[in-house]
Image: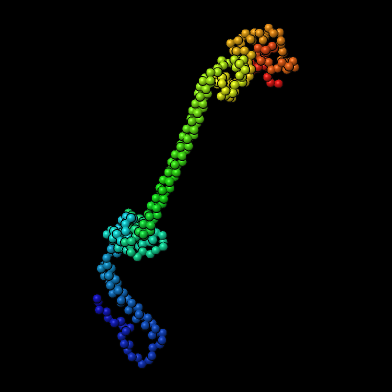
Amino acid sequence: MPIMSRPACFRPAPSQSAPLRPRRRMLSAGGCLVALVLALTPVLAGCDGAAAQGATPTGAATTQALITVPDVVGMKGDVATEALEKAGLTQRPSYTDVDGKESVWKPSNWSVTAQDPVAGTQVPADQAITLTVNHDSAKATASARASASAAAQASASASAAAAAEEQARQEAARAAEEQAQQQAQQEAQTEQSQTQEQSDGSSGTYYADCADAWAAGAAPLHQGEPGYRSGLDRDNDGIACEWKPARTESDQTQVQEQSDGSSGTYYKNCAEARAAGAAPIYRGEPGYREKLDRDNDGIACEWK
């Protein structure tokens, strides 16, 4: 560093017998200050240049390497912390209860459900990671509740299936019972008919048709009486030969011919027959003809 000589303004002024005027004193002080500044400028400039030469660029020194955030979802809290540290993250993660109700004191009792930033994000080493966690006891409770609900549903389904099966069994039993009753009734009716026919034959009384029964004076024949049989009871009402026929069926043609013209009795309609007092007219009797016997039962004009 060059040795600076003291400026003249700092040298002792020669004594003067006469005092200086104030204005001249001010100019002398200002000049000394300017001279001092000019003298120090090169020195200060040299120090700044040396400092600038010894300084290093700061941009390259402050650049940090980025860390890839690992995936810690599903891990215990303490295991997740170790994984983040091994990845190169220096900040301890913060924990947040998923329900926002509890504080995390022991990370090993908590499981990570989410993380921020997410896995695969590039962050600085001092980036803070936030882990959302769920207490294992709550998870166990939820699992127990789910298991209990599933068991209840399975029990309800089994009960419903058993009830449906029981109802189907009862309906099948009821249908089988009704079918058995109907079959028993049919068998009873068949047996009764067979018994009746046997009784009709065992009595020794037999009528070939209702004409024979009427000719024998046995008609009408009630069920159970000698000579009754289902063949004579056309309407199956338990009474056979309730209507008096004119002749046997074998003589029907001959009787028809006789009744239609040979007797000479003719009724235009049933009103005339009733007016003449001849109704009802049985087949074979004077005045009977088929046109007056609408139901062809051998009896004409039976209804008034």
Quarter of the image where the C terminus is located: top right
50 or 2, which lies in front? Answer: 50
Residue at the image position 36 percent from the left and 64 percent from the top: 104
The vertical placement of 144 against 218, above or below, is: below
Residue at the image position 41 percent from the left and 45 percent from the top: 158
The vertical placement of 202 against 10, above or below, is: above
Residue at the image position 27 percent from the left and 81 percent from the top: 5
Residue 125, image quadrant: bottom left
Q: How many marks?
A: 0
In the image, residue 252 lies at what x, y percent?
A: 61, 11
Residue 282, image quadrant: top right
In the image, residue 266 lies at what x, y percent?
A: 71, 11
186 or 97, which lies in front? Answer: 186
207 or 155, which lies in front? Answer: 207
Residue at the image position 46 percent from the left and 41 percent from the top: 167
The vertical placement of 108 against 29, above or below, is: above
Residue 114 visible from this viewpoint: no
Q: Which residue is the extreme one toward the top?
A: 262
Q: Which residue is the extreme one toward the front?
A: 203
Residue 255 visible from this viewpoint: yes
Q: Which residue is the extreme one toward the right?
A: 275
In the image, residue 43 lies at what x, y percent?
A: 28, 74
Q: Is residue 111 left or right of residue 301?
A: left
Quarter of the image where the N terminus is located: bottom left
The vertical placement of 280 against 191, above or below, is: above
Q: Is residue 223 left or right of residue 85?
A: right
- Report the colour scheme: rainbow
In the image, residue 179 lies at what x, y percent?
A: 48, 32
Q: Is residue 170 left or right of residue 66?
A: right
177 or 104, which lies in front? Answer: 177
